[in-house]
Amino acid sequence: MKRSLSIDVYFDFICPWCLIGRRQLQAALAQFKAAQPEVEVNLAWQGVQLLPELPFDGQPFAEFYRRRLGSDQAVRQRQAQVCEAASAEGEQIEFSRIERMPNTADAHRLLLHASELGSEAQVEALLERLLAAYFRQGEDLGDRATLLRIAEQCGFASEALAGSLRGDGLPFASASADIAARGVPCFVFDDRLQVVGAQPAEALLEAMQLAVSGLAEREA
């Protein structure tokens, strides 16, 4: 019987640690698949809206973080820390380009609907493009036209996804609301083993190996 491994990743588009965690997961997956090519990996991205209270059109980014962290100096220090961690994973974050802290409800609805319509490769491409749009180009992921344009670039018909965008600021309803209290990113392997926060690829690889080992024991 062919073995499989399910990985659910709980994330929000506005969390830079989720982008960093994605790169760490990709590195871990490459090692895992090279070592155990017989294991089928099923990867799913589960949206968690960290800031459902934001207005539907978001807030000014600099103002949001200044109020959250208390001072411009604290913001600079936090952003420098994040950029250093991102650089270690080969990623670049352009905080200076980000003008708005978006309400991500519709971005999550878009990805969820896209996952029901498209292939795994299309969904991965869409997620990658959305993250790049925000963290590299500073695009507004709360903007309807921006979301649909990005979806079209990934091979989706905008008319097929337009109905999923509410544009009313209502929170994104998901079964993963309790995950936000533990923190994102959160990696869940085979519905039983959790790793919370951006972690080195080695830690994620170890979790995958443990999960598969447990599965193999149940099948024996």
Image (tube, helix red, strand yellow):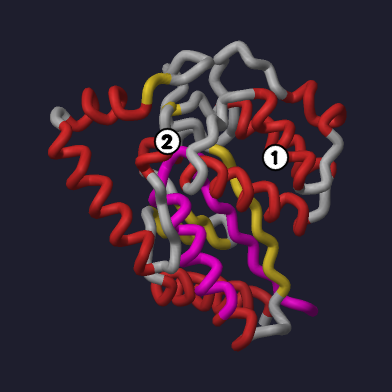
Q: Position of residue 134 (x, y in %)?
A: 51, 41
Is 219 situated left or right of 130 in this image? right
Task: Identify the image quadrant of residue 95.
Answer: top left
Label 1 environment density (alpha carbons within 10 Å; few <14, some 14–19, many ≥20)? some
Q: CA distance from mark 1 to mark 2?
A: 17 Å
The amino acid beneath tag 1 is Ile
Question: Considering only vertical position in the picture, is 15 above or below 29?
Answer: above
- Please tell me which residue lies in front, 120 or 206: 120
Tell me if residue 25 is in the magenta stretch: yes
Q: Position of residue 75 (x, y in %)?
A: 21, 38
Task: Identify the image quadrant of residue 34.
Answer: bottom right
Q: What residue range appears in magenta?
A: 1-30
User: For the point 55% across and 81% down, which residue is it?
Assistant: 31
The amino acid beneath tag 2 is Ile
Q: SS for tag 1? A: helix
Tell me if residue 40 is in the magenta stretch: no
Q: Identify the residue position indicated by label 2 in the image.
A: 98
- Please tell me which residue lies in front, 155 or 165: 155
Is 103 situated left or right of 128 in this image? left
Mark 1 or mark 2: name the one nearer the start of the chain. Answer: 2
Residue 150 image label: 1
Question: Considering only vertical position in the picture, is 3 above or below 131?
Answer: below
